[in-house]
Image (cartoon, coloured by chain):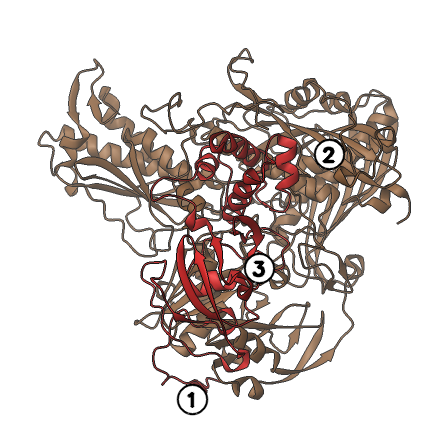
Amino acid sequence: MNPSENADDSRPGVSRRSVLGGGAAVAVAVPLLVTGAGAEAAPVAEVASADLVPIKVEVNGKPVSVRVDPRTTLLDTLREELELTGTKKGCDRGQCGACTVHVDGRRVLSCLTLAATVDEREVTTIEGLARGDRLHPMQQAFIERDGLQCGFCTPGQIMSAVGMVHEGHANSDDEIRERMSGNICRCSCYPFIVDAIRDAQKVMR
Amino acid sequence: MTGQILPGARSDGSAWSVGAVGGAVAPGCGSSGGVRCVGGGVGGIGASPVRPDGALKVRGEFAFSSDLWADDMLWGATLRSPHPSATIRGIDVGAALAVPGVYAVLTADDVPGDRHYGLEVADQPVLAVDEVCYRGEPVAIVAADHPETARRAAERIVVDYGVREPVTDPEVALAGGRLVRHVPIRKGDPAAVAEVVVTGEYRVGMQDQAFLGPESGLAVPAPDGGVELYVATQWLHADQRQVAAALGLPVELVRLSLAGVGGAFGAREDLSMQVHASLLALRTGRPVKMVYGREESFVGHVHRHPAILRYEHGATRDGELVYVRARILLDGGAYTSTTPAVVANAASLGVGPYRVPNVTVDAYGVHTNNPPCGAMRGFGAVQACFGYESQMDRLAEAVGLDPVEVRVRNALAEGGSMPTGQVVEGPAPVARLLELVRDRPAPPPVGDDPRQLPGGVANTTAPEQVVRGVGYAIGIKNVCFSEGFDDHATARVRLELIGGEPTALVHTAAAEVGQGLVTVQAQIARTELGVERVVVATADTSVGSAGSSSASRQTYMTGGAVRAACRAVRAALLARLAGGSGAGADDGGVADDGGAVGDGGVVGDGGTVGDGGGRVAGGGLELAGGVIRDAAGRTLGTLVDLLAAGPVERSVRWRHRPTRPLDPVTGQGDAHVQYAFAAHRATVDVDPELGLVRVVEIATAQDVGRAINPQAVLGQIQGGTAQGLGLALMEELQVVDGVIRNPSFTDYLIPTILDVPPMAVDVLELADPHAPYGLRGVGEPPTISATPAIVAAIRAATGLPLARVPVRPEHLTGTG
């Protein structure tokens, strides 16, 4: 049962990144954001084909042009097209918060956001938070307060926390808990997460 | 809500605590200043250095198993059974094969080696063989150049099922002879009588580990005909053994490396996609990645055993236990997994940490057509604790005693005897832990801020509707593997100059699953070798097995192995010094550890190595801070000088002291290595009209023997307690006729940051003389007693009997 004859091995330029995201393809790679990325034009899987939509988006401060399947989520586009795997897929249904990113400065669930809707907008992911070696105060506080164990929810927690502080609603532990309740941590580092956010919001002010 | 530490609050200096409010941290926490290190140097044991993987994790650069890729990789997908029980009359894969982009479609006929696998018993099919025994059982796998292509192709596989009536009631299964294991415990007089008798039947629902990082990994075919597998797991070598057997390959051709683990909690002890991805990779000659979605994850791993527990407690009018009789029935689901060990835990720990002269316990695990159950944090001890602690509250009421008092009156203590006849060696501060949580200040009374009320900001609860309750519970857990299992861990430690600075490289196969094991390994190396710079290598199978990151055992076992290997390195260094030349004093300094899979070059067990260090240092030589001094404190040499002759490397396979099997008739035997204890006090507010519960505060007291990393200890206590809260109030896989009805985070609820209350923690450090540094396993005990403490608090508030967890709103309103 090994139908390698069914597979089209002859296609040129198959990108290692071409296989996800409902068939999105990076058509124009304005300097790609990640090292070692062999971003090339890629074929679209037959069963997932659809008319591609070109979008221009600023990701972590850098302009990116990409053609996406209109059904593709921002999460899959980030992870599989732009190789920004720091944003996590925990449920793909908007139930866990692990995929939280910022669009135009507001926190959104990238798994419930179609990539086509962020055209001409700014997206910030966990990879765009630090300034070189200098961590964002929220990242630093999560390390120092040990606001993580396995770390899978951490990018979403941090993006959500930064967004909440910018919203101006991190003024008490109760407020922090209320407004972080969309981000699940199964290791239940919640007490340390509150500690970290309380520390960081003082620095961020 | 870590709080102000109260250093020196206990007269013996062996305890510390954090309050439920405030902003201070545990002793030794933080990366700078004030670290408390026994062996000298910054960041040794007893300190709380930051996680070496912390920066990567907060930057989003830590590579979890679902983040992996390889050039030319394909994607795997799994076709699963829609029926809990059916024969397979035929499988037609033609339509799937015809889908463009599909490279392979495999069924059981394509499994070249053993078609079945399992941790204890190889009874679970790699792919269904002629029948399916639970809904979600893998039937066929597909590799394609796109994950959506693979999924859609899998849907085109036609399976001809002969649907059977599933067995989903564990009582029916037991009566029908589908027994996996029966563990009887017999102690004292089986016909003992007592003045006061309380009975009860309790039920525990099916809890799920629900880690956030789904099952995933990448299999890469190797030029030698083998496979390289990068996977999130708890036990690399157990995976290796099972994968190799299924592939029909020698183990050395199946090489595993640990990919980033997004939580585990027991669910990664059994295989999931490991064999499937490897099969597809070997068949296609291409790397194959598999990632489960959330729904697939819920059916793709084992769960906590649901339980039915019947208890009868007999006591004097003064509340002293005379006997306990219990029958515990655990639903193991379709395949064996770790059910035998879970049954043994439920039986041997079945009366709790109490002195009971007469015990009759029968614990059973059975096969049904429900989803398979296996390891989850607490492992059999969780279910039993809900039963025996509910009983202790009934007993307290029956004899008119305070719940804490009745427990203290029966508390196990050092030198006491378990129902198995095993004498509890070392500290067993059961009474003290209970008194610690009891003596905590009570949380403030209910206010009128809606955020503080059971209904939350939905503003459904008026303050005058709220009733408050307080409940207590204590639990007991075995640490490490039991019943005579040959439990060991291997560590390889290499000390060398890198950039002129002494650097220790620690290499084990132990799985970091978030508990902080890589931090602890580095701390131990710093303490033992007096160096600051430590690199912990990625765990893989090129070093000997570390055993599983389960049973609260890994700091004990791999920590013990790292300590032993460090001491072997130290002994070799000191021998090099004694040789005078500083070079060649000991076979060139690099131990032959045999490399690959085996444990060649084993230096000895922990004791031997420790003695070896002592022998060389017997003249009073001491290694600290990179300097070797004699007894008079004179400097004899430095690490830098000694290492100039070359690196020193030692590999040690380390064991805990042996255990014994339980007698199959009487259940007597020294089956466990170490016991660990935690107690909880829960305070809840209940809106009885709407059936809403808000946990106001949880106080925990736990003896950890020695806190190797106090911050990580707190993290384990908080996290474990929260998972116990989940079982008490919300977490249950609802299985109807063998079908999981709620495989999503919308319908399977796990605690959010709003559900987890402030936690006050008291930590005792009463050394276990048998354990490395005196430490006691930490991860599981807080999960065990949190559940019954919360339910006891709800009972206290409402007066309802509440014999089942999770407690749902309809149980409180009387509408369900």
In the rendered image of the structure, the colour used to display chain A is red
* Label whose residue precedes the other's in the sequence (1 or 3): 1
Amino acid carrying mark 1 in the image: Glu
| Chain displayed in brown | B
| Residue named by callout 3 | A111
* Mark in the foreground, 1 or 3: 3
Q: Residues within 10 Å of mark 3 (few under 14, many from 20)?
A: many
The reply to whether the C-beta atoms of the residues labelled 2 and 1 are less than 8 Å apart is no
Q: How much space separates mark 3 and mark 2, taking CA atoms?
A: 29 Å
Question: Which residue lies under the disc numbered 2?
Answer: B451
Q: Where residue B278 appears, x then y in whole percent?
A: 44, 69
Left or right: residue B533 versus residue A162 is left
Disc 3 residue type? Cys
Q: Secondary structure at mark 2?
A: helix
Residue at left 87%, top 33%?
Answer: B798
Give the quadrant of the N terminus of chain B.
Answer: top right
- The dot on residue A5 is 1
The amino acid beneath tag 2 is Arg
Q: Is the same chain shared between marks 3 and 2? A: no
- Confirm or deny contact between disc 1 and disc 3 (CB under 8 A): no
